[in-house]
Image (spheres, rainbow, N blue to C red):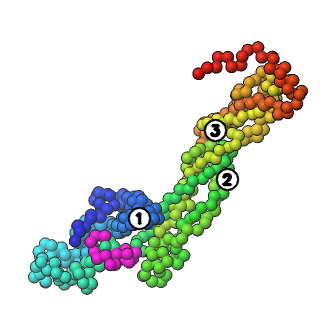
Amino acid sequence: MAKERDLYEILEVPKSASQDDLKSAFRKLARKYHPDVNPGNKQAEERFKELNAAFEVLSDPKKRALYDELGADAIRIGFDPRQAEAYRQWKRGGSGGAAGSRSRSGMGGGGADFGGFNFDFGQSSGSDFSSIFETLFGGGFGGGGAHRSAASRQRGAAMGPVEGDDLSLDLTIPLNLAVRGGEQEIRFEHGSRCGQCAGGGMASGTRRVCPACQGTGQGSGKPKILTVKIPAGAEEGSKIRLAGQGAEGLRGGPAGDLYLITHIAPHPRIRRDGRDLYLDLPITVAEAFFGGEVRCPTFDGNFTLKIPEHSQSGRKLRLRGLGVPQLRGGGPRGDFYAVLQIVLPESDSKANQEAIRTLDAAYDLDVRAGISL
Protein backbone atom coordinates (compact mmCIF):
# COMPACT_ATOMS: atom_id res chain seq x y z
CA MET A 1 0.00 0.00 0.00
CA ALA A 2 1.29 3.45 -0.90
CA LYS A 3 2.28 5.71 1.95
CA GLU A 4 -0.60 7.87 3.09
CA ARG A 5 -0.06 11.60 2.73
CA ASP A 6 -0.47 13.88 5.71
CA LEU A 7 -3.67 15.93 5.52
CA TYR A 8 -1.88 19.10 6.61
CA GLU A 9 0.64 18.54 3.85
CA ILE A 10 -2.20 18.24 1.32
CA LEU A 11 -3.58 21.65 2.36
CA GLU A 12 -0.03 23.06 2.57
CA VAL A 13 -0.42 24.31 6.14
CA PRO A 14 1.44 23.52 9.39
CA LYS A 15 -0.25 21.41 12.09
CA SER A 16 -0.55 24.55 14.19
CA ALA A 17 -2.75 26.23 11.55
CA SER A 18 -5.90 27.91 12.83
CA GLN A 19 -9.34 27.14 11.40
CA ASP A 20 -9.21 30.42 9.49
CA ASP A 21 -5.81 29.46 8.06
CA LEU A 22 -7.19 26.08 6.98
CA LYS A 23 -10.20 27.68 5.34
CA SER A 24 -8.07 30.25 3.53
CA ALA A 25 -5.62 27.62 2.28
CA PHE A 26 -8.43 25.34 1.13
CA ARG A 27 -10.20 28.11 -0.80
CA LYS A 28 -6.99 29.17 -2.51
CA LEU A 29 -6.05 25.65 -3.58
CA ALA A 30 -9.61 24.59 -4.44
CA ARG A 31 -9.91 27.51 -6.85
CA LYS A 32 -6.57 26.63 -8.42
CA TYR A 33 -7.44 22.96 -8.99
CA HIS A 34 -11.21 23.24 -9.55
CA PRO A 35 -12.35 21.10 -12.52
CA ASP A 36 -14.01 24.12 -14.14
CA VAL A 37 -10.66 25.90 -14.22
CA ASN A 38 -8.84 22.78 -15.48
CA PRO A 39 -11.21 21.06 -17.91
CA GLY A 40 -10.01 17.59 -18.86
CA ASN A 41 -7.05 17.71 -16.46
CA LYS A 42 -7.27 14.45 -14.49
CA GLN A 43 -4.37 15.35 -12.20
CA ALA A 44 -6.05 18.60 -11.20
CA GLU A 45 -9.32 16.71 -10.65
CA GLU A 46 -7.62 14.22 -8.32
CA ARG A 47 -5.87 17.04 -6.48
CA PHE A 48 -9.24 18.78 -6.03
CA LYS A 49 -10.73 15.59 -4.55
CA GLU A 50 -7.74 15.27 -2.23
CA LEU A 51 -8.17 18.83 -1.01
CA ASN A 52 -11.88 18.37 -0.32
CA ALA A 53 -11.27 15.17 1.61
CA ALA A 54 -8.48 16.69 3.72
CA PHE A 55 -10.53 19.79 4.48
CA GLU A 56 -13.55 17.69 5.42
CA VAL A 57 -11.49 16.13 8.22
CA LEU A 58 -9.47 19.10 9.43
CA SER A 59 -12.37 21.59 9.36
CA ASP A 60 -14.22 19.43 11.92
CA PRO A 61 -12.67 20.08 15.38
CA LYS A 62 -13.55 16.61 16.69
CA LYS A 63 -12.21 14.79 13.64
CA ARG A 64 -9.13 16.98 13.64
CA ALA A 65 -8.43 16.18 17.29
CA LEU A 66 -8.65 12.45 16.59
CA TYR A 67 -6.51 12.82 13.48
CA ASP A 68 -3.87 14.76 15.43
CA GLU A 69 -3.84 11.97 18.03
CA LEU A 70 -4.09 8.87 15.87
CA GLY A 71 -3.04 10.03 12.42
CA ALA A 72 -4.38 8.01 9.49
CA ASP A 73 -5.69 5.39 11.94
CA ALA A 74 -8.41 7.88 12.87
CA ILE A 75 -9.61 7.75 9.27
CA ARG A 76 -9.61 3.97 9.28
CA ILE A 77 -11.89 3.77 12.34
CA GLY A 78 -14.25 6.35 10.87
CA PHE A 79 -13.55 8.84 13.67
CA ASP A 80 -15.74 6.73 15.99
CA PRO A 81 -14.87 7.78 19.60
CA ARG A 82 -15.71 4.30 21.03
CA GLN A 83 -13.50 2.57 18.54
CA ALA A 84 -10.87 5.25 19.11
CA GLU A 85 -10.80 4.40 22.81
CA ALA A 86 -10.54 0.68 22.05
CA TYR A 87 -7.78 1.46 19.58
CA ARG A 88 -5.91 3.46 22.23
CA GLN A 89 -6.10 0.48 24.57
CA TRP A 90 -4.76 -1.77 21.89
CA LYS A 91 -1.95 0.67 21.05
CA ARG A 92 -1.03 0.84 24.72
CA GLY A 93 -1.20 -2.95 24.95
CA GLY A 94 -3.69 -2.60 27.80
CA SER A 95 -5.94 -5.30 29.26
CA GLY A 96 -9.56 -5.74 28.42
CA GLY A 97 -11.28 -8.49 26.56
CA ALA A 98 -9.94 -9.56 23.25
CA ALA A 99 -7.63 -6.57 22.92
CA GLY A 100 -4.98 -8.26 24.98
CA SER A 101 -5.46 -11.62 23.42
CA ARG A 102 -5.00 -10.68 19.78
CA SER A 103 -1.58 -10.50 18.23
CA ARG A 104 -0.53 -7.55 16.07
CA SER A 105 -0.04 -9.91 13.20
CA GLY A 106 -3.80 -10.33 13.18
CA MET A 107 -4.01 -6.86 11.67
CA GLY A 108 -2.48 -8.12 8.50
CA GLY A 109 -5.17 -10.71 7.81
CA GLY A 110 -8.65 -9.52 7.11
CA GLY A 111 -9.72 -8.19 10.49
CA ALA A 112 -9.04 -8.16 14.21
CA ASP A 113 -11.32 -7.79 17.23
CA PHE A 114 -10.10 -5.22 19.75
CA GLY A 115 -12.20 -4.78 22.88
CA GLY A 116 -15.36 -5.89 21.12
CA PHE A 117 -14.86 -3.67 18.07
CA ASN A 118 -14.04 -5.12 14.71
CA PHE A 119 -11.30 -3.37 12.70
CA ASP A 120 -11.69 -4.95 9.29
CA PHE A 121 -9.04 -4.04 6.70
CA GLY A 122 -10.61 -5.95 3.88
CA GLN A 123 -14.20 -7.14 4.04
CA SER A 124 -17.11 -4.78 4.48
CA SER A 125 -18.19 -5.86 7.98
CA GLY A 126 -18.13 -3.79 11.15
CA SER A 127 -16.02 -0.68 10.68
CA ASP A 128 -14.55 -1.23 7.23
CA PHE A 129 -11.16 0.47 7.01
CA SER A 130 -10.81 0.29 3.24
CA SER A 131 -14.35 1.48 2.55
CA ILE A 132 -13.96 4.42 4.96
CA PHE A 133 -10.65 5.19 3.33
CA GLU A 134 -12.17 4.89 -0.12
CA THR A 135 -15.12 7.11 0.76
CA LEU A 136 -12.90 9.85 2.15
CA PHE A 137 -10.15 9.77 -0.44
CA GLY A 138 -11.64 8.25 -3.56
CA GLY A 139 -8.82 5.69 -3.85
CA GLY A 140 -6.14 8.38 -3.98
CA PHE A 141 -4.31 6.87 -0.99
CA GLY A 142 -3.98 3.32 -2.19
CA GLY A 143 -7.54 2.05 -1.72
CA GLY A 144 -9.29 -0.05 -4.33
CA GLY A 145 -9.78 1.90 -7.52
CA ALA A 146 -13.08 0.30 -8.59
CA HIS A 147 -15.20 2.65 -6.45
CA ARG A 148 -13.04 5.73 -6.84
CA SER A 149 -15.34 7.99 -8.85
CA ALA A 150 -18.58 7.00 -7.13
CA ALA A 151 -17.08 7.29 -3.65
CA SER A 152 -15.45 10.59 -4.48
CA ARG A 153 -18.72 12.03 -5.74
CA GLN A 154 -20.49 10.80 -2.61
CA ARG A 155 -17.87 12.48 -0.50
CA GLY A 156 -18.04 15.68 -2.55
CA ALA A 157 -21.82 15.81 -2.18
CA ALA A 158 -21.49 15.55 1.59
CA MET A 159 -19.15 18.52 1.78
CA GLY A 160 -20.31 21.86 3.04
CA PRO A 161 -20.80 24.99 0.94
CA VAL A 162 -17.89 26.08 -1.26
CA GLU A 163 -17.49 29.62 -2.56
CA GLY A 164 -17.77 30.00 -6.33
CA ASP A 165 -14.76 30.78 -8.51
CA ASP A 166 -13.88 34.30 -9.58
CA LEU A 167 -14.26 34.87 -13.33
CA SER A 168 -12.57 37.34 -15.66
CA LEU A 169 -13.88 38.78 -18.90
CA ASP A 170 -12.15 40.94 -21.52
CA LEU A 171 -14.23 44.04 -22.27
CA THR A 172 -13.46 46.33 -25.22
CA ILE A 173 -14.87 49.84 -24.85
CA PRO A 174 -14.77 52.91 -27.13
CA LEU A 175 -12.34 55.71 -26.25
CA ASN A 176 -15.08 58.23 -25.48
CA LEU A 177 -16.55 55.87 -22.86
CA ALA A 178 -13.11 55.38 -21.30
CA VAL A 179 -12.68 59.15 -21.07
CA ARG A 180 -16.14 60.22 -19.94
CA GLY A 181 -17.32 57.07 -18.17
CA GLY A 182 -20.82 55.70 -18.51
CA GLU A 183 -22.71 52.43 -18.87
CA GLN A 184 -22.22 49.52 -21.22
CA GLU A 185 -24.17 46.30 -21.62
CA ILE A 186 -22.21 43.05 -21.49
CA ARG A 187 -23.26 39.50 -22.37
CA PHE A 188 -21.40 36.42 -21.17
CA GLU A 189 -21.81 32.74 -20.31
CA HIS A 190 -22.53 32.35 -16.61
CA GLY A 191 -22.21 29.11 -14.60
CA SER A 192 -25.39 28.21 -12.71
CA ARG A 193 -26.56 25.92 -9.94
CA CYS A 194 -27.80 22.49 -10.97
CA GLY A 195 -31.55 22.68 -11.63
CA GLN A 196 -32.27 19.18 -10.29
CA CYS A 197 -30.58 19.46 -6.89
CA ALA A 198 -30.59 23.29 -6.53
CA GLY A 199 -26.83 23.21 -6.01
CA GLY A 200 -26.98 20.69 -3.14
CA GLY A 201 -25.23 17.87 -5.00
CA MET A 202 -27.71 15.22 -3.77
CA ALA A 203 -30.76 13.89 -5.58
CA SER A 204 -33.90 15.40 -4.07
CA GLY A 205 -35.18 13.46 -1.05
CA THR A 206 -32.36 10.91 -1.18
CA ARG A 207 -28.78 10.41 -0.07
CA ARG A 208 -27.67 9.60 -3.62
CA VAL A 209 -25.42 11.77 -5.73
CA CYS A 210 -27.40 13.96 -8.13
CA PRO A 211 -27.23 12.26 -11.56
CA ALA A 212 -27.45 15.56 -13.41
CA CYS A 213 -24.36 17.24 -11.91
CA GLN A 214 -22.57 14.21 -10.41
CA GLY A 215 -22.49 15.87 -6.99
CA THR A 216 -20.82 19.12 -8.01
CA GLY A 217 -23.96 21.25 -7.63
CA GLN A 218 -23.12 23.00 -10.91
CA GLY A 219 -25.39 23.21 -13.92
CA SER A 220 -24.58 24.15 -17.49
CA GLY A 221 -23.70 27.72 -18.38
CA LYS A 222 -26.42 30.17 -19.34
CA PRO A 223 -26.31 33.54 -21.09
CA LYS A 224 -26.33 36.54 -18.76
CA ILE A 225 -26.74 40.23 -19.55
CA LEU A 226 -25.48 42.98 -17.24
CA THR A 227 -25.32 46.76 -17.50
CA VAL A 228 -21.89 47.79 -16.26
CA LYS A 229 -20.81 51.21 -15.04
CA ILE A 230 -17.49 52.19 -16.63
CA PRO A 231 -15.51 54.68 -14.52
CA ALA A 232 -14.21 57.87 -16.16
CA GLY A 233 -10.51 57.50 -16.95
CA ALA A 234 -10.56 53.75 -17.58
CA GLU A 235 -7.24 52.55 -18.96
CA GLU A 236 -5.96 49.63 -21.00
CA GLY A 237 -5.88 46.67 -18.62
CA SER A 238 -7.95 48.32 -15.88
CA LYS A 239 -9.94 45.91 -13.70
CA ILE A 240 -13.57 46.46 -12.80
CA ARG A 241 -14.85 44.18 -10.01
CA LEU A 242 -18.48 43.06 -9.98
CA ALA A 243 -19.06 41.42 -6.61
CA GLY A 244 -21.08 38.22 -6.63
CA GLN A 245 -21.30 38.00 -10.44
CA GLY A 246 -18.77 35.18 -10.83
CA ALA A 247 -19.40 31.44 -10.82
CA GLU A 248 -22.12 30.31 -8.46
CA GLY A 249 -20.96 28.49 -5.35
CA LEU A 250 -21.16 24.76 -4.78
CA ARG A 251 -23.78 23.34 -2.46
CA GLY A 252 -25.25 26.72 -1.60
CA GLY A 253 -21.93 28.55 -1.23
CA PRO A 254 -21.68 32.26 -2.19
CA ALA A 255 -20.91 33.21 -5.77
CA GLY A 256 -17.45 34.44 -6.74
CA ASP A 257 -16.70 37.82 -8.30
CA LEU A 258 -16.50 38.85 -11.95
CA TYR A 259 -13.50 40.93 -13.05
CA LEU A 260 -13.76 42.92 -16.26
CA ILE A 261 -10.42 43.64 -17.96
CA THR A 262 -10.86 46.79 -20.06
CA HIS A 263 -9.36 47.25 -23.51
CA ILE A 264 -9.64 50.58 -25.34
CA ALA A 265 -10.70 50.37 -28.99
CA PRO A 266 -8.70 52.62 -31.38
CA HIS A 267 -10.48 55.85 -32.32
CA PRO A 268 -10.50 56.88 -36.00
CA ARG A 269 -9.45 60.48 -35.21
CA ILE A 270 -8.28 60.77 -31.59
CA ARG A 271 -4.94 59.51 -30.28
CA ARG A 272 -4.35 58.95 -26.58
CA ASP A 273 -1.02 59.42 -24.86
CA GLY A 274 -1.36 58.87 -21.13
CA ARG A 275 -4.01 61.35 -20.03
CA ASP A 276 -3.59 63.66 -23.06
CA LEU A 277 -5.67 63.46 -26.25
CA TYR A 278 -4.61 64.53 -29.76
CA LEU A 279 -6.78 65.44 -32.76
CA ASP A 280 -5.50 66.28 -36.25
CA LEU A 281 -7.54 69.41 -37.07
CA PRO A 282 -7.76 70.41 -40.76
CA ILE A 283 -7.50 74.14 -41.59
CA THR A 284 -7.42 76.07 -44.86
CA VAL A 285 -4.45 77.92 -46.31
CA ALA A 286 -6.15 81.23 -45.52
CA GLU A 287 -6.86 80.21 -41.88
CA ALA A 288 -3.23 79.20 -41.50
CA PHE A 289 -1.93 82.42 -43.04
CA PHE A 290 -4.35 85.02 -41.69
CA GLY A 291 -5.44 83.22 -38.54
CA GLY A 292 -9.04 83.03 -37.37
CA GLU A 293 -11.50 81.08 -35.24
CA VAL A 294 -12.53 77.49 -36.02
CA ARG A 295 -14.74 74.83 -34.43
CA CYS A 296 -12.88 72.04 -32.59
CA PRO A 297 -14.81 68.91 -31.50
CA THR A 298 -13.91 67.22 -28.17
CA PHE A 299 -15.51 64.51 -26.03
CA ASP A 300 -16.91 67.36 -23.92
CA GLY A 301 -18.58 69.06 -26.89
CA ASN A 302 -17.53 71.63 -29.49
CA PHE A 303 -15.15 74.46 -28.60
CA THR A 304 -14.05 77.56 -30.53
CA LEU A 305 -10.32 77.49 -31.18
CA LYS A 306 -8.35 80.60 -32.13
CA ILE A 307 -5.78 79.94 -34.90
CA PRO A 308 -2.74 82.27 -34.72
CA GLU A 309 -1.72 83.82 -38.04
CA HIS A 310 1.11 82.21 -40.00
CA SER A 311 0.45 78.83 -38.35
CA GLN A 312 2.18 75.81 -39.87
CA SER A 313 0.99 72.21 -40.15
CA GLY A 314 1.87 70.30 -36.99
CA ARG A 315 1.37 73.25 -34.65
CA LYS A 316 -0.33 72.11 -31.41
CA LEU A 317 -3.02 74.20 -29.77
CA ARG A 318 -3.99 73.14 -26.25
CA LEU A 319 -7.40 72.97 -24.63
CA ARG A 320 -6.49 72.62 -20.98
CA GLY A 321 -8.32 70.06 -18.84
CA LEU A 322 -10.26 68.38 -21.65
CA GLY A 323 -8.19 65.20 -21.73
CA VAL A 324 -8.56 61.97 -19.76
CA PRO A 325 -9.52 62.17 -16.06
CA GLN A 326 -7.44 60.47 -13.38
CA LEU A 327 -8.97 57.03 -12.76
CA ARG A 328 -10.86 57.10 -9.45
CA GLY A 329 -10.06 60.80 -9.04
CA GLY A 330 -7.11 62.20 -7.14
CA GLY A 331 -5.60 64.34 -9.89
CA PRO A 332 -6.32 66.85 -12.68
CA ARG A 333 -7.52 65.82 -16.10
CA GLY A 334 -5.12 65.69 -18.97
CA ASP A 335 -5.21 68.15 -21.88
CA PHE A 336 -6.70 68.07 -25.38
CA TYR A 337 -4.40 69.07 -28.26
CA ALA A 338 -5.54 70.16 -31.71
CA VAL A 339 -2.73 69.42 -34.17
CA LEU A 340 -3.14 71.77 -37.15
CA GLN A 341 -3.05 70.24 -40.62
CA ILE A 342 -3.15 72.61 -43.62
CA VAL A 343 -5.37 71.25 -46.39
CA LEU A 344 -4.97 72.42 -49.99
CA PRO A 345 -7.96 72.94 -52.29
CA GLU A 346 -8.89 69.79 -54.20
CA SER A 347 -10.08 71.61 -57.32
CA ASP A 348 -7.53 71.65 -60.16
CA SER A 349 -8.97 74.75 -61.79
CA LYS A 350 -6.77 77.24 -63.65
CA ALA A 351 -7.55 79.86 -61.02
CA ASN A 352 -6.29 77.60 -58.25
CA GLN A 353 -3.18 76.71 -60.22
CA GLU A 354 -2.43 80.39 -60.70
CA ALA A 355 -3.00 81.14 -57.06
CA ILE A 356 -0.66 78.32 -55.99
CA ARG A 357 2.09 79.50 -58.35
CA THR A 358 1.72 83.00 -56.96
CA LEU A 359 1.92 81.60 -53.42
CA ASP A 360 4.96 79.50 -54.31
CA ALA A 361 6.77 82.58 -55.54
CA ALA A 362 6.24 84.15 -52.13
CA TYR A 363 8.67 81.75 -50.39
CA ASP A 364 11.86 83.62 -49.50
CA LEU A 365 13.75 80.59 -48.14
CA ASP A 366 14.19 76.94 -49.02
CA VAL A 367 11.58 75.18 -46.85
CA ARG A 368 13.89 72.12 -46.60
CA ALA A 369 17.00 74.01 -45.63
CA GLY A 370 18.79 72.37 -42.75
CA ILE A 371 17.02 69.02 -43.19
CA SER A 372 19.61 66.23 -43.25
CA LEU A 373 20.18 62.80 -41.77
Which residue position is annotated with label 1? 41
For numbered disc 2, what is the local secondary structure?
strand
In the image, what residue type sits under mark 3? Arg
Q: Residues within 10 Å of mark 3 (few under 14, many from 20)?
A: some
The magenta stretch is 140-155
> Vertical placement of 283 versus 137: above or below?
above
Q: Secondary structure at mark 1?
A: loop
Q: Is residue 25 above or below residue 107?
A: above
- Residue drawn where x is 23% and y is 67% of the image: 3
- Specify whether 108 is left or right of 9: left
Judged by depth in the image, the label closer to the viewer, 1 or 3, is 1
**Mark 3 against mark 2, which lies toward the viewer?**
3
Image quadrant holding the N terminus, namely: bottom left
**Count of numbered labels shown in the rendering:** 3
Q: Secondary structure at mark 3?
A: strand
Which kind of residue does numbered mark 1 sit on?
Asn
Residue corresponding to mark 3: 272
- Give the Cα separation between the discs numbered 1 and 2: 38 Å
The overriding secondary structure of the stretch rendered in magenta is helix
Judging depth in this view, the residue of 232 and 191 nearest the camera is: 191
The residue at 56%/56% (across/down) is: 169
Label 1 to label 3, Cα distance in Å?
Answer: 43 Å
